[in-house]
Amino acid sequence: MPSNTATSSTDNNASQSDNHRDFRAETRAWLEANCPESQRQPPVEGEGIWGGRNPEFANSDCQQWFERMRDKGWTVPNWPVEYGGAGLSPLEHQILKEEMRRLRCRTPLNDLGILMFGPALMEYGSEQQKSEHLPKIARGEIRWCQGYSEPGAGSDLANIQTKAEDKGDHFLVNGSKIWTSYADKSDWMFCLTRTDSSAKKQQGISFLLIDMDDPGITAKPIELISGNRHFCQVWLDNVKVPKANLVHKLNEGWTVGKAVLQHERKSMSETSESSSSGDLTAERLLDFYLERSTEQGREGQIENAELRTALTNHQMNMRMAKLCQQRIYEEYMAGTPSGLAMIMKYIGTEELKRKDELILAAMGNRGMAWEGEGFTEDELLIPRNWAMDKAYTIAGGSSEVQLNILAKNVLGLPD
């Protein structure tokens, strides 16, 4: 009897392996047949697909790629079918991501609703809230922004002062949010508000969903050192928010807010391999150095011991990060998750910063490009990417805050 059971288990495992091989083959064939050639290269400025109430597409290929992936359920492939996803298992989702990377497919839909808010709403939202908002996120019909930081509440996020007063059938919201990405282009905001000023900071916060078309909302872009203007400051002046837009429980929004941040950090941990500095991965960075040295007649540049060490350290760190990601996945599949995932945001954003610093070092004086004639598009883009890297090490919790979290929650060190 034990022998038969073992045989049956082996057969099941073999069958599952065959199924996944079939899924990979089918996925590869579908992507090759449906992803336009122009969508198989690093994103060009202005060609990202964001969706929203009034979506804009840079060209017909962008729109075609988005619509095909949307109809397949692959804008959110691991979400349940009833919420607009494809219901893929974790392993199937991993296979899809691998095949998209292999073909260099662009992300079909960018939205904070996908990366951050949607997964948290799935966990804490009411069924009515999930049914109303998740399918629209999946179909790219609504674009979301994050109302967290305030002029006086950044790293100390629990110090928010934006108030939501209970007015019976609605909340009346007053305050200001800052560093709100794409607030001027978004349709809805998921927002942390103060609903009990007498409670401890984390215990008096509620999580509200706010329609950006509501009266009393003003969003103004902020120009960054990179030249980008996607961050905004938002003012909320007597904004009426229906009680139905309260997620989870009154005064317990900090729980939902932390869940959103976990998903944000997870998405940012992958930034170093998908940044807009082309698809220049750690593996190709050495080749890039050799190519630039040859172009500029500096064959011996790579012999610089300091640069060689920095390149090697970056390559080793990114290899380590990939192994950590695989270990996190295996732990998840085995039902024994550890605290390892908490290091990935810190590693990803810090290594992205180091990578672009190395690229600038390879460019020499050409790395000082910012504007004007005489520079290529890449030469103008790379310094701005380098400047933008500083924001990645702050957003979602600064690197210093991340180290404090790791010290306390992973290493068990005292406060």
Image: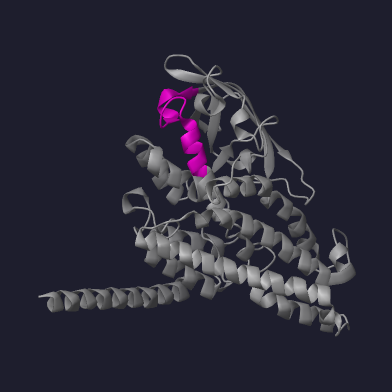
x, y percent for residue 308: 78, 76
Residue pushed farthest left? Answer: 1
x, y percent for residue 156: 64, 34
Queried whether the magenta region covers residue 347, the answer comes back as: no
Is residue 373 rendered to the left or right of residue 325? right
Q: Residue at x 44, y 63 (%)?
A: 329
Magenta residues span: 241-260
> Is residue 143 visible in the rendered structure shown here?
no
> Is residue 402 visible in the rendered structure shown here?
yes
Is 332 drawn above or below residue 413 in the view shown?
below
In terms of depth relative to the viewer, which is nearer, 372 or 204? 204
Is residue 342 rendered to the left or right of residue 44? left
x, y percent for residue 153: 66, 32
x, y percent for residue 207: 49, 31
Is residue 387 rendered to the left or right of residue 397? right
Protein image colouring: one colour
Is 218 drawn above or below residue 263 in the view shown?
above
Where's the C terminus, which quadrant? Answer: top right
Residue pushed farthest front? Answer: 414
In terms of depth relative to the viewer, which is nearer, 49 or 206? 206
Quadrant hosting residue 248: top left
Queried whether the magenta region covers residue 245, the answer comes back as: yes
